[in-house]
Amino acid sequence: MKKLTMLLCLISAAVLSTQAFAREVVLTTELKSYGGDGAYLAIYLTDAEGQYQETLWVAGQKSKYYKHLVGWARASRLRSSEYDGITGASITSGKTLTVTLELADRYIDSGFQLRVDSSVEDMRDNRNDVVVPLTSEGAGKPVVGSGYIKVFSYSL
C-alpha cells in the first residue's frame, strides 16, 4: 500500500510540474482624442525577434477592416479560427479599453513583447503603435503610443 501511495504521489508531482501555469493579466489601452470613427486595435505577442506568437485581443468586429492592422494582419495571416471569441467592439476617441485574460507564465520575463496595432477608418494605420517587453518589472508602468494610443499599461 505504501508503494502504491508513493507511486501515485510521484506521478501526481510529475504531471503538475509539467503543466503550464498561467496568471491573470489586465491590459489597459487609453486612446487619444482624435476626430474620427472608432479605432480598431490588435493586441498580440511576439518573441524577442519580433516573430508573431499569439493574438490576445482584437477591438473591432468587422473582419474586413483587420487588414488595416498591418503588423498583426501580416504576422497572424488573419487566421480567423485563432481570434474567434477574443474580439470586441471598436474603441472611440478618448475612451479606454480594459481587457482581462489568462496568460501563460512562460511569456513573462522571457523576452516576449506585447504589441498593439491601431487603425481608424479614413485615417492613418499605425503598425506597432505600442511595443513593450512583457516583464514583471514593466507591469503597471504606462507606455505612450506612437499613434492613436495615448497610454498603454499591463498588470500581472
Image (spheres, grey):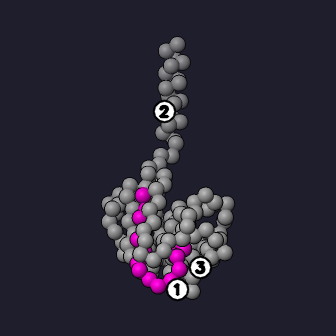
Percent position of residue 65, x then y = 62, 76
> Which residue type does callout 1 highlight?
Arg
Give the residues in magenta: 26-40
Badge 1: residue crowd in 10 Å (few <14, some 14–19, many ≥20): few
Tell me the tag on residue 98. none
Cα distance in 3D space between marks 3 and 2:
47 Å
At a point 34% along the width and 69% down the height, the residue shown is 142
The reply to whether residue 71 is visible in this rendering is no
Tell me the tag on residue 124. 1
Label 3: state its secondary structure: helix
Q: The C terminus is located in which quarter?
A: bottom left
Cα distance in 3D space between marks 1 and 2:
53 Å
At a point 50% along the width and 37% down the height, the residue shown is 16
Could you say which quadrant of the image residue 80 lies in? bottom right
The reply to whether residue 38 is visible in this rendering is yes
Q: Earlier in the sequence, mark 3 or mark 2?
A: 2
Tell me the tag on residue 68. 3
Q: Which residue is mark 2?
A: 13
Label 1: state its secondary structure: loop
Badge 3: residue crowd in 10 Å (few <14, some 14–19, many ≥20): many
Relative vertical location of residue 116 with respect to residue 11 in this rendering, above or below:
below
> Which residue type does callout 3 highlight?
His
